[in-house]
Image: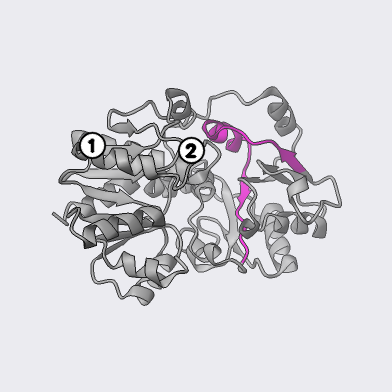
Amino acid sequence: MRLSYIFPKHFKPKVANRIQTVNQAFYFDKILGKAFSFLVCDGYTDACLECLGLHGFSSMVQLGCPSVGIPKSYLFWLKLFLSKKYIQDSLLYIRDYDSLILLTFLKKIGVISNKIIFEAHDLPNKSRVLDRLRLTSAIIAISGSLQDELQERIQYDKLMLVAHDGFSSLLSDQRKLPLEVERVCFNLSKDSIIYVGTYHKWKNIELIIEFANFDSSLSFVIVGVSPEDLSVKPMYSNVTFLPFLDYALMPSLLKRFRYAIVTTSNNYTISKYTSPLKLFEYLASGLTVFVPDVRNMREVVSHSSTGYLYDNQCVIKAASLIKGVVERYGPINKAKIVMYAQQFSWESRAIKIVSALSKLD
């Protein structure tokens, strides 16, 4: 089996889909060797890969296309099809809907005959895009809830596999944090609850502020989000904000905490299907997690066994649950959580996907 992972995007270290894609490609490379190609735009320098704990891989081909233009990826696809050696006789693995539309069109008119594998991270809202999914040979869904919704919409009769996002096992927790961050962490309560991420409305980070405002005994640390971004402001001094940190520093930061939180809003469709990277990083670091009690989170977290599920529709209930865990029960056994998390490593995910795809040939 030959596999070509096509990702017509430029590297941006703060963007989750770049982190996910590069980590996954790294392990595809380790498993498949010369039978794998990772086809990207540019910006994937050694320094960028180092910040993810990766040290390059021979299968990466950077086609050096500009980040702007109409269409943005025109030169990327032109270069790709002029260099057919990268996709000849390969399964074509993609994860963006623009690529899906283009490749299924080319397959429909007979320009290519490759099998197309699509990794779905959300549900498209256009029927013509859903129709294109029927032309693929396999779909990898990042959650069971997304898999079921896709199945209901398109009545898919080919391979559909659930593969949650994962964590990097290559990052060391011995890297030094910036001095100002070390100083802040040193002065925090041992029961402070950490959130790491970037601001998007559907993530509902304001919910953390509501918890903190409801009960001033709860202590939260929000990393990567500015208070100016939030529509709800802290009333007390129990919320600490830290700046964005390189992904490579996450294990060093997380080892200073015992609890972590994930937030989402039920008002956004993406919240029903997301498989947040931060959740798996938290678990891999042995943190006791608080996550919304919704299906895609229940697929990963079992209440009181590997974390806690809270009602994200009721601040009083959720804050009371969090307070009760912190004050009465304490964190779940760290070694137990770390052991449980191993199934969600990028390596485990790659092995699962490659094993399934190998049966398509």
Residue 129 sits above or below residue 198 on the image: below
* Residue type at numbered disc 2: Ser
The answer to which of 297 and 20 lies nearer the viewer is: 20
**What number is the disc on residue 83?**
1
Comes first in the chain, label 1 or label 2: 2
Which image quadrant: the C terminus? bottom left
Q: Tell me what residue is drawn at x 20 percent, y 40 percent.
A: 84
Does 175 sit above or below residue 160?
above
What number of labels is visible?
A: 2
Q: Position of residue 138 (x, y in %)?
A: 26, 60
Q: What number is the disc on residue 67?
A: 2
Boundaries of the magenta span: 240-265
x and y, in percent, of residue 310 in the image: 62, 64
Q: Between residues 24 and 187, which one lies in front from this camera angle? A: 24
In screen coordinates, is 89 left or right of 279? left
Q: CA distance from mark 1 to mark 2?
A: 20 Å
Residue that protrudes farthest toward the right in the picture: 235
Disc 1 marks a residue whose amino acid type is Ser
